[in-house]
Image: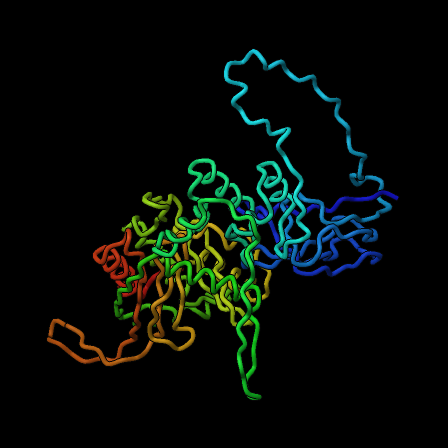
Amino acid sequence: MAQYELLLPKMGESVAEATVIKWVKQPGDVIDLDDTILEIATDKVDSEVPSPVAGKLVKQLFAADEVAQVGDVIAIIETEDSNVPTIESPVVETPVAEENTASIPGIEQLPDHNNSVTTTDFSSSDRFYSPLVKSIAAQENISLAELDAIKGSGVDGRLNKDDLLDYIAGKNGKAVKKATVILTPPAPQVEEVVAHQTEPSTQAPVASKPSTTSINGADEVIEMDRMRKLIADHMVMSKSTSPHVTSFVEADVTNMVLWRNKVKNSFEKRENEKITFTPIFVEAVAKAIKDFPMINVSVNGTQITKKGNINIGMAAALPSGNLIVPVIKNADQLNLVGLTKAVNDLASRARNSKLKPDETQGGTFTLTNVGSFGNVMGTPIINQPQVAILAVGAIKKKPAVLETEHGDVIAIRHMMFLSLSYDHRVVDGSLGGMFVRRVADYLESWDLNREI
């Protein structure tokens, strides 16, 4: 019998770790090829890890709610397949003779890390730390009390590698500013924290006593699920990061509605796909971004990054009531058929929790359809680190004044509101207003005879 190491698979270029949600298979269970072993979560996306071999699960190396890095061994599977890579005994390397550094000028001024590394007992902390974080903390002689005081940006405030490295960089650069790990913009209360953290804390922070809430028998206390906590944190962070401004435009989309009604049956028969208004909106947004590329940017401090690709996220409501934003990559390079297939595919897999982590990453602009809930307009919150988000409202029949060569007339038209929320740090009212107006222009000028 051979033993196979199941590794946490690579789930995308920007995904480095995942949280174990639950184990589907338990030690001793028989596993067939492609059986789901466990469920994991990265940001908002839940994924299943299948078994690449058949056999029996011998050992689970991560418990539920623990974080594993991509490439970590997460389970051991016993298999009869002799062709699979087996676990080998660790290779003990022969120590290399140390180089004589006594003659190097100034060598005595460098810290001796080999002699200064101490072992920290993490068992007394209620906070979870990954093996990588523990290793870095040990190498840098960071005490458990000091580690507990660092604010984490991971799931449920978990401290990840980048948080710790940022803290160490700030600590080594300016020893008095221990609070440089706080990622929110400076505020008076932050300055007060800096002033009180000029010396390392010798005690672990004492947890505040939870407040007692009195409720009557008709009330129900519901704990937020993991995704709702992530969404809540992301929304609060966005509002505290970007000064939001919203501009509104009303568009006459009669031609667009009539055209879709005319082609939807033949399109579905030919492409085996239903055509909705969403791909039409995405196409108009992609065209407008090409006209106003400074909407397609992100902000890092005082630096503006102008994005080379137009990757449009489309906010999708899940059956649980939570929200997820799958991304259509290079939307400007797809025709209407391609956009329709991409929209339908992402929406379907989002509802069934089948999205891959990479499919929610890399968005440069977001579109949300509040009209699908019967709302005529909305003021959406920017999906950081983007700088703008467009909401499209419900299409309603209304009486409208039309200018004709014979004079003004009142007619029944299909009307809708578009609202653009944008980051006023880098997008002024003129740019924001012209952009949303240009999107409306593309929708209003829809060709009734367009071939598809």
The image shows residue 173, relative to residue 18, as above or below, that is above
Q: In the image, 370: left or right of 209? A: left
Residue at 50 percent of width and 52 percent of height: 151
Nearer to me, 375 or 218: 218
Nearer to me, 10 or 139: 139
Residue at 84 percent of width and 44 percent of height: 81
Q: In the image, 390: left or right of 138? A: left
Nearer to me, 271 or 439: 439
Residue at 18 percent of width and 77 percent of height: 401
Indicate the position of residue 426 as horizontal and vertical percent values: 28, 51
Indicate the position of residue 203 as horizontal and vertical percent values: 57, 51
Indicate the position of residue 267 as horizontal and vertical percent values: 46, 65
Q: In the image, 343: left or right of 161? A: left
Indicate the position of residue 423 as horizontal and vertical percent values: 31, 56
Q: Which residue lies furthest to the right in this view?
A: 1
Q: How many marks?
A: 0
The image shows residue 320, relative to residue 330, as above or below, that is below
Quadrant of the rendered structure where residue 217 is?
bottom right
